[in-house]
């Protein structure tokens, strides 16, 4: 299998970039999950136009079904990325607890706040609003983007991940503002689909611009 070193066109130029691409290498394989976001967004828009009431219970079930049905595609694209860009055996699923991001004294209050947020979204809102859905996938995806924004080596990366992450982190609070369940589900899962699609394409472009295109002739010959 060819390594990433054989077709790097513009490699990371600083230790922060190397650390970021190593730590979040698997998350940067954007084509593994971008189609899921596109299908989810189309499904939400179609539901709004055809039968809005189905979104109340159908949106979360449809999202989980998409994740299961898309697993063969994700596996296939994962192999494509490995063939084109190589493998990362260590640091692929990194932690924000590094000296370059923040210390444990900062992490503990942050973790406490996240736990309180999870309790609010998963327990308080379902018990005190007509909606049973806790939007776990929505705010958890936002949390992942916020975590990724902290060690991002470039300001544009930090702003991109932080902005989309905060949007997904805040939108589950919509049931506290309105009792229109169709609107709540459409906004939550429509935004999740749009962010997944957009960030997936953005991450793919970021990865190939750093490690080289996936249709590199040397890669094709090596396969």
Image (cartoon, helix red, strand yellow):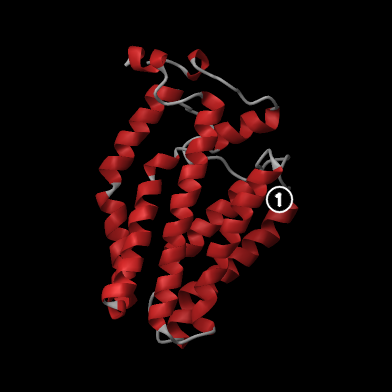
- Is label 1 in a helix, a strand or a loop? helix
In the depicted view, which residue is nearer to us: 14 or 159?
159
x%, y% of residue 56? 33, 77
Up the image or down, 122 lies above or below 169; here it is: below
Residue 41 sits in quarter: bottom left
Residue for point 63% across, 26% down: 12
x%, y% of residue 124? 50, 81
x%, y% of residue 29? 45, 37
Residue for point 43% across, 80% down: 126
Residue 2 sits in quarter: top left
In the depicted view, which residue is nearer to us: 2 or 44?
44
In the depicted view, which residue is nearer to us: 75 or 114?
75
Up the image or down, 204 lies above or below 162; here it is: above
115 relative to 53 in the view: left or right: right
x%, y% of residue 73? 29, 41
Residue for point 49% across, 13% down: 6
Near mark 1 (Cα within 10 A), the count class, few <14, some 14-19 or many ≥20, is few
Q: Which residue in the rendered view is the most extreme toward the front? A: 49
Disc 1 target residue: 104
Residue for point 64% across, 66% down: 113
Up the image or down, 3 lies above or below 183; here it is: above
């Amino acid at each position: 299998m060819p390594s990433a070193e054989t077709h790097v066109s513009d490699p990371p130029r600083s230790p922060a970039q190397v650390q970021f691409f190593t730590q979040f290498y698997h998350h940067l394989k954007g084509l593994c999950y971008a189609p899921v976001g596109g299908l989810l967004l189309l499904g939400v828009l179609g539901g709004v136009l055809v039968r809005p009431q189905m979104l109340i219970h159908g949106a979360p079930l449809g999202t989980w079904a998409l994740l299961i049905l898309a697993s063969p595609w994700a596996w296939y694209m994962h192999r494509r990325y490995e063939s084109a860009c190589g493998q990362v055996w260590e640091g692929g699923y990194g932690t924000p607890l590094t000296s370059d991001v923040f210390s444990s004294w900062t992490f503990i209050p942050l973790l406490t706040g996240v736990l309180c947020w999870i309790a609010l979204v998963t327990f308080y809102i379902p018990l005190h609003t007509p909606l049973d859905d806790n939007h776990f996938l929505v705010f958890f995806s936002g949390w992942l983007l916020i975590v990724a924004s902290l060690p991002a080596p470039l300001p544009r990366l930090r702003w991109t991940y932080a902005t989309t992450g905060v949007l997904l982190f805040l939108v589950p609070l919509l049931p506290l503002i309105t009792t229109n369940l169709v609107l709540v589900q459409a906004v939550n899962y429509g935004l999740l689909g749009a962010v997944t699609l957009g960030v997936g394409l953005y991450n793919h472009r970021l990865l190939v611009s750093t490690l080289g295109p996936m249709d590199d002739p040397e890669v094709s010959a090596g396969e």
